[in-house]
Image (tube, rainbow, N blue to C red):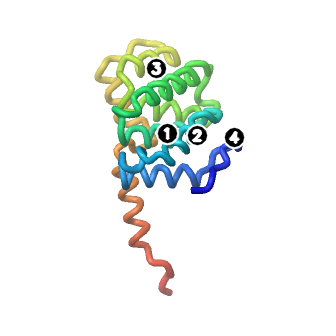
């Protein structure tokens, strides 16, 4: 496998898409591959962005027991970034990060509550917070919509019939 140029700070959408598809289709067999682990580690070392968060988190969630420490650090990094911003609605990337952070299955409710209260105040009930976390995220952490999207692309004809 040729070396991946990790010196670039911008997001590489193609690499992210390949990693997410590989993790979805092959699950922990993919993420436990030594070469893939190296690529994930290189992404983790780069400046933090929403797309890197989603890519790493999706891959790590295929084997959450093995990647628990990395998931915890990744979530902590996201919480710090979100909590340090006055108005998350100013940048789309920050708002998306907040929504997917709150909707993530591996983050304890107490942590979600803490981030929410720091940003918006109040004292939301457990039921309200649960309802919010069920509907707010942009990412399907289970991969069901990825499966649907891949199947739809397979069924799409290559040439349109006139």
Q: Are marks 1 and 2 in contact (CB under 8 Å)?
A: yes
> Which residue does the numbered mark 1 point to in the structure image?
56
Q: Quadrant of residue 41?
A: top right
Q: Residues within 10 Å of mark 1 (few under 14, many from 20)?
A: many
Picture residue at 44% right of the left edge, 54% below the top: 21
- Label 2 belongs to which residue? 43
Earlier along the polypeptide chain: callout 3 or callout 4? Answer: 4
Among the 4 quarters of the image, the one containing residue 126: top left
Of the numbered discs 4 and 2, the one sitting upstream in the chain is: 4
User: Do the residues under discs 4 and 2 have CB atoms within 8 angstroms?
Assistant: no
Neighbour tally class for label 4: few under 14, some 14-19, many 20 plus, Cα within 10 Å: few
User: Which residue is under mark 3?
Assistant: 116
Q: Are marks 4 and 1 in contact (CB under 8 Å)?
A: no
Q: Nearer the viewer, mark 3 or mark 2?
A: 2
Q: Nearer the viewer, residue 58 or 130?
A: 58
- Marks 3 and 4, Cα distance to the nearest angstrom? 29 Å
Nearer the observer, 134 or 22:
22
Q: Is residue 41 left or right of residue 146?
A: right
Distance of label 1 from label 3 (alpha carbons): 23 Å
Left or right position of 102 against 81: left
Q: CA gap, disc 4 to disc 2?
A: 9 Å
Residue denoted by label 4: 9
| Helix, strand or loop status at disc 4 | loop
Helix, strand or loop at disc 2?
helix
């Amino acid at each position: 496998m040729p070396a991946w140029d990790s010196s670039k700070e911008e997001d590489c959408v193609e690499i992210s898409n390949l990693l997410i598809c590989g993790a979805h289709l092959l699950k922990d067999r993919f993420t436990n591959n030594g070469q893939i682990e190296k690529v994930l580690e290189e992404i983790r070392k780069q400046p933090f962005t929403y797309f890197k968060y989603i890519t790493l988190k999706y891959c790590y969630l295929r084997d959450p027991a093995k990647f628990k420490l990395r998931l915890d650090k990744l979530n902590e990094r996201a919480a710090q970034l979100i909590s340090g911003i006055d108005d998350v609605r100013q940048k789309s990337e920050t708002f998306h990060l907040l929504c997917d952070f709150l909707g993530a299955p591996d983050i304890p409710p107490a942590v979600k509550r803490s981030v929410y209260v720091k940003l918006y105040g109040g004292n939301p009930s457990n039921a309200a917070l649960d309802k919010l976390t069920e509907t707010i995220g942009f990412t399907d952490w289970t991969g069901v919509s990825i499966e649907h999207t891949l199947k739809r692309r397979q069924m799409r004809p290559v040439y349109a019939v006139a």
